[in-house]
Image (tube, rainbow, N blue to C red):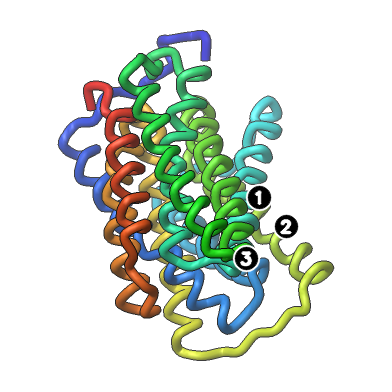
Amino acid sequence: MSNKKRDLRKKLDNKGYLLSIFVAFLWSGNPTSVKISLNYTTPFLVGFLRFTLGGIIALIWAIYRKDTLKIKRENIFPIILAGLFPAAQIGFYNIGQAHTLASHGIIMIVTFPLWAAVFSHFFTPNDKLNLSRTLGLITAYSGVVVLFWDSINQSFTEYLFGDILMLISAMLLGARLIWVSHITQRVGQSQVILSEAIVGSIMSLFLAIFFENIFLNISLKLILSMAYQGILIAGMGIILQTYLLRSYLPGKVTFFNLFQPIIGIFISWFLLDERLSFILFLSIFLLTIGTYFTVRKKV
């Protein structure tokens, strides 16, 4: 990454704006979808199904584009690492979502632009934090603290455990975004996506077999929720997201995830009948305002 001529990432144009908004909207329903699927199977098996379906879509896309899947020796480690990030991230995500509300899950996971901004500050030369963005980080994280405190105050210790796991998942997702943005400057997009699917599927299946009491109750709700997670998000969503990260500065791509919390909690309220509270909206307000100032740098 020291060779600036090879870094083709740019500021958002109209195409980047529209795709970023669409991807953010697509991700808004993911916590609710995961919460529904966990009624019918185990967290790691949900991850296995998600990665497998996403991998099939990615393979079809690669064949359609006639992308080469041959990997150069010097790119093997970066690609494997790119696969380990989502495998770990989805593991924490699914287990965390099993122990907390979908509305809590959406708030915790959308902190990933904050983590991405922090990591980007250290690893992306043209995407540094300044004073206003740093104050934005503090404001946004105060929204997370508000939600943590509410769980502690209400003695919802199970929610607190799930919230912490979701926050770790968000941190891993932020790190993944920066890593993918860097390596796709020299590695093919399809290679990265398929690596994520293959490594994620293998790890999820291994963990499900050895650490879970596996059950699988086939139902229409499970099929629809897995189609959403696997085909729309792990397939189409990841393809679009990887393209955006390859083409644009990562701190700018994540800006439109500001819309996710408010959309996500209303989805969980509508489909899961989860309670909407003042604390929930206060947390979202602080997170949204803080994230705006964190990632707004000449978006």
Q: Residue at x 56, y 82 (%)?
A: 39
Q: Secondary structure at mark 1?
A: helix
Alpha-carbon distance for marks 3 and 2? 25 Å
Which residue lies at the image location 32% right of the left edge and 46% below the top edge? 257
Return the residue at label 1: 88
Gap in angstroms between the C-alphas marked 1 and 3: 21 Å
**Residue 30, picture quadrant:** bottom left
| Sequence-wise first label, 1 or 3 | 1
Q: Which residue is mark 2?
A: 203
Name the residue carrying label 3: 158
Residue 29 vertical position relative to residue 258 in the rendered view, above or below: below
The picture quadrant where one finds residue 84 is top right
* Tally of numbered tags: 3
Residue 142's tag is none
Q: Nearer the viewer, mark 1 or mark 2?
A: 1
Q: Position of residue 17 (x, y in %)?
A: 21, 39
Q: Quadrant of residue 255?
A: top left
Compared with 233, 170 (above or below) is above
Q: Closer to the camera: disc 3 or disc 2?
A: 3
Q: Residue at x 42, y 30 (%)?
A: 138
Residue 254 seen from this side: yes
Dot 1 or dot 2, earlier in sequence: 1
Residue 174: image x %, image y %?
A: 50, 38
Marks 1 and 2 close (CB-CB < 8 Å): yes
Quick check: 167 left or right of 199? left
Residue 62 position, x and y percent, is: 46, 51
Query: Which one is closest to the eye, mark 1 or mark 3?
Result: 3
